[in-house]
Amino acid sequence: MKSEFCIVSDGSCDIPASLAKENDIRIVHFLVSFNGSDYKKEGIELELPEFYQQMVSYPDIYPKTAAPSPEDFYAAFEEKAKEGRDILCICISAKLSSSVQSAEIARQMLAETYPAVRVAVVDSLCCTLMQSAFVLEICRLRDAGHSLDETLEAVDALRKSGRILFTVGNLDYLQHGGRIGKVTSIAGNLLDLKPLITLQDGEIHSSGIKRGRRKSLAGILDLLVSYLKENHCTPDDCNILIGYGYDPEEGRFLQEMTRKRLGEEFGPQSTLPAFQIGATIAVHAGPYSIGYGLVRRSDRL
């Protein structure tokens, strides 16, 4: 039996294709360019391993991304509208991209040809790993039989509960994007300083600085544990995902490090998935970004 509504998300959610298929999530892909003119669809025309290899092989070339067009969203909406089901579309924070604007235009276009199909466009106030956790929690609500209206009622609390906690390999990409100055970037790289960064309510905040990669990984793990304790919850109360960039081995290292620490603090962890971070965020943070995305489970808020 098909659910009452279907789920569409832009590609910022970084959910692997196999998992998206398993959960009946239609992904609308972002576009990536290394020369500023030729754009390819991430995950379709440009696979993530190739994207990261180009970043590592040509560190002086900074790639760019472009949001999906209204036509891209319309094609996804029409595909589902033909099935006669309503649509919940989840987009990256409007503070970070114009994706939600494209989806809204597509919603208005679809209303002209499929007036009986309802489309709800949601600004997730998140991106990458947090958006993954957000979308998967929406899937859980859908699969539990919640209506579209009931699911939309849970959205605000989910958004407020979400965090991205991460660090980067060096400061070059943050400097290139204008988030820090050139002198700060050079000095930081010389001293091997790694920022700890939190994304909350769609905005990026500094959460400290550590010297060296291992200490920065321990630092973001401390942020995760602090979040759980400050919010009086356990890992089982949340959807927690690990995200890594170019190096899958480092992702596995953080996964085991996290499983051990959370086990000591809260008891054994049954699941702690690790996904590769997509291009939407990697172009701004670099190929060695790593961290966590999390959202509280709606039934445990």
Image: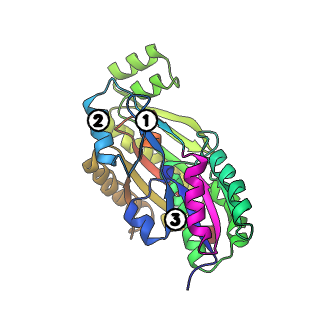
Mark closer to the observer (1, 3): 1
Separation (CA) of disc 1 from disc 2: 11 Å
Q: Horizontal and vertical percent for residue 179?
A: 53, 25
Residue position marked by numbered label 1 in the rendering = 283
Is disc 1 in contact with disc 2, using a CB cutoff of under 8 Å? no
Residue position marked by numbered label 3 in the rendering = 136
Residue position marked by numbered label 2 in the rendering = 54
> How is this picture coloured?
rainbow
Residue that appears at 39% across and 61% down: 17
At mark 3, the secondary structure is helix
Which disc is residue 2 wearing? none
Q: Is residue 110 left or right of residue 210?
A: right
Q: Which quadrant of the rendered structure holds the C terminus?
A: bottom right
Is disc 3 in contact with disc 2, using a CB cutoff of under 8 Å? no
- 10 Å neighbourhood of mark 3: few (<14), some, or many (≥20)? many
Q: As shown in the figure, which amino acid type bears the numbered disc 1?
A: Val
The image quarter containing residue 269 is bottom left
Mark before the other along the chain sequence, 3 or 2 = 2
